[in-house]
Image (cartoon, helix red, strand yellow):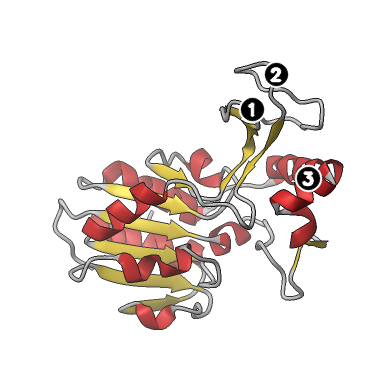
Amino acid sequence: MTLPRDARIVILTGAGISAESGLRTFRAADGLWEDHRVEDVATPEAFGRNPELVYRFYNERRRSLAAVQLNAAHLALARLEKEWPGELLLVTQNVDDLHDRAGSRNLLHMHGELLKGRCLGCGAVADWPDDMDGHSRCPTCTRGLVRPHIVWFGELPLGLERIYAALECCNLFVAIGTSGHVYPAAGFVEAVGPRARTVELNLEPSRVVDAFQEHRVGRATDLVPALVAELLGGPAF
């Protein structure tokens, strides 16, 4: 794949890229998330009904990240950001920290971050690597209750204005490991400008695969380094 060296790139990653590091995808075939109904752990109403369950659920997810290692796809995207001379925005639907660990910096977590907390009082977001509960208080205002910094169902994803602005002027949009079921991310391919090239990398075609000009089937750990090598004009690693 050949692009002008000043081309703008937007990359969207979903659960498929982290699944190869051992993290389960967001929702299993039976609709459960880590054996819980989404309605019980991933909505504002769930937090209002049973905050102890919600805190416990995310505490367990947070602890599990310590045993998860980033993979070749995360490293390849960090390499692309470092070596690509044009603009690059990496948007992830994932709440893990694997892109961060790999070294990606021009990174937008549209669904929040597992290792951060958000104050219900002042709205400040702070790093939060440890457990949180009903006694956790905001380090900024010192009074507000802290909740997981996760975009729950029924809440607006983060950074949409910046994402859509980048999509409108990008030359290449790549979706990696996404199912095409969750909006607005599933509709990003429709928001790119008419001159942009669009590519989907996935284990199997997503629900919106027909909207892409090109589709490559396989593991992210194989496909992503290969694509990065194409763009940079050198070996994968």
Residue to which mark 2 is pinned: 143
Local SS, label 2: loop
The amino acid on which the numbered mark 2 sits, given as a three-letter code, is Arg
Q: Position of residue 153 (x, y in %)?
A: 64, 57
Dot 3 alpha-carbon crowd within 10 angstroms: few under 14, some 14 to 19, many 20 or more: few
Quadrant position of the N terminus in the picture: bottom left
Residue to which mark 1 is pinned: 121
Residue sitting at 44 percent across and 39 percent down?
103
For the residues bearing labels 1 and 2, Cβ distance under 8 angstroms: yes
Residue sitting at 28 percent across and 52 percent down?
165
**Left or right for 27, reference 191:** right
Labelled disc at residue 48: 3
- 100 or 237, which is in the foreground? 100
- 91 or 168, which is in the foreground? 168
For the residues bearing labels 3 and 2, Cβ distance under 8 angstroms: no
> How many labels sit on residues?
3
Q: CA distance from mark 1 to mark 2?
A: 8 Å
Asked whether residue 132 is in view, the answer is yes
Dot 1 alpha-carbon crowd within 10 angstroms: few under 14, some 14 to 19, many 20 or more: some
**Residue 134: which quarter of the image?**
top right
The amino acid on which the numbered mark 3 sits, given as a three-letter code, is Gly
The amino acid on which the numbered mark 1 sits, given as a three-letter code, is Gly
**Left or right for 142, reference 85:** right
Q: Position of residue 12 (x, y in %)?
A: 42, 59
From what the image shows, is residue 141 above or below residue 103?
above
**Residue 150: which quarter of the image?**
top right
- 72 or 110, which is in the foreground? 110
Residue sitting at 78 percent across and 51 percent down?
46
* Sequence-wise first label, 1 or 2: 1
